[in-house]
């Protein structure tokens, strides 16, 4: 028996058929959306792994450059070196749209690597250290933007998956059960009507 009250009529059967078609179309759209999201997430994860490998390479280079600069100047002298003019520029966020979602690409805007004031003791080691950490920050900004977009897509994928499964495993089976119930009732009504017609003909002189 269906959970909702249904009147066994041809109109009810047609309405249930229309409802099933609409729900089926909704499920197909959700299924297509989750497949597109899954493909985009997998592609994003591959890009993230590439950026992470690049970041690890820059991290190793930055550590080596820092060690060389500390050996050359000492930690206190190196800490007193002037910062580059472009070292503190803002992160530029470029929004993009995907399936109704607003994602973001992040890019660190770096200006010319010029010191804010002349260093007391400039060296190749100090310059290489600053350059290495600039590259490290640039890659980290790109990773941060991609990670934020991946989290947005992952949350939407979970919601889409939940809705698609609800339509596939709950709503559609309920409608199919309602259609079977109404169809069975209509068959029973047709059989009763046929029996009444035969009996009425049998009673005719």
Image: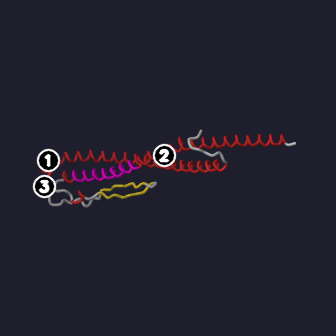
Q: Residue at x 19, y 46 (%)?
A: 68
Horizontal relation, residue 198 to residue 159: left or right: right
Q: Which residue reaches farthest right?
A: 205
Q: Secondary structure at mark 1?
A: helix
Depth order, front residue of 124/95: 95
Q: Position of residue 89 (x, y in %)?
A: 25, 59
Q: Position of residue 174 (x, y in %)?
A: 57, 42
Placement of 14 over or under 85, stated as above or below: above
Depth order, front residue of 179/11: 11
Marker disc for residue 75: 1
Q: CA distance from mark 2 to mark 1?
A: 57 Å
Residue 187 colored in magenta in the image? no
Q: CA distance from mark 3 to mark 2?
A: 64 Å
Q: Residue at x 36, y 58 (%)?
A: 94
Tags 2 and 1 in contact by the CB under 8 Å rule? Answer: no
Residue that label 3 marks: 121
Depth order, front residue of 116/190: 190
Tags 3 and 2 in contact by the CB under 8 Å rule? Answer: no
Q: Residue at x 18, y 52 (%)?
A: 126
Marker disc for residue 180: none
Q: Earlier in the sequence, mark 2 or mark 1?
A: 1
Q: Start and end of the magenta stretch? A: 128-152
Horizontal relation, residue 41 to residue 87: left or right: right
Q: Secondary structure at mark 2?
A: helix
- Determine crowd level at label 3: few under 14, some 14-19, many 20+ residues with C-alpha closer than 10 A: few
Q: Earlier in the sequence, mark 3 or mark 1?
A: 1
């Amino acid at each position: 028996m269906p959970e909702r009250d249904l009147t066994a009529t041809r109109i009810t059967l047609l309405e249930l058929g229309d409802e099933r078609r609409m729900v089926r179309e909704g499920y197909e759209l959700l299924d297509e959306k989750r497949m597109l999201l899954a493909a985009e997430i997998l592609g994003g994860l591959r890009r993230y792994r590439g950026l992470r490998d690049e970041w690890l390479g820059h991290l190793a280079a930055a550590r080596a450059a820092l060690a060389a600069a500390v050996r050359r100047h000492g930690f206190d002298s190196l800490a007193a070196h002037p910062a580059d003019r472009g070292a503190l520029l803002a992160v530029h966020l470029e929004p993009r749209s995907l399936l109704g979602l607003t994602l973001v690409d992040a890019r660190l805007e770096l200006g010319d690597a010029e010191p804010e004031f002349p260093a007391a003791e400039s060296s190749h080691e100090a310059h290489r250290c600053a350059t290495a950490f600039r590259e490290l920050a640039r890659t980290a900004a790109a990773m941060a933007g991609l990670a934020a977009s991946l989290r947005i897509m992952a949350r939407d994928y979970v919601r889409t998956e939940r809705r698609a499964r609800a339509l596939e495993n709950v709503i559609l089976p309920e409608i199919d059960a309602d259609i079977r119930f109404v169809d069975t009732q209509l068959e029973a009504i047709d059989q009763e009507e046929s029996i009444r017609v035969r009996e009425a003909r049998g009673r005719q002189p």
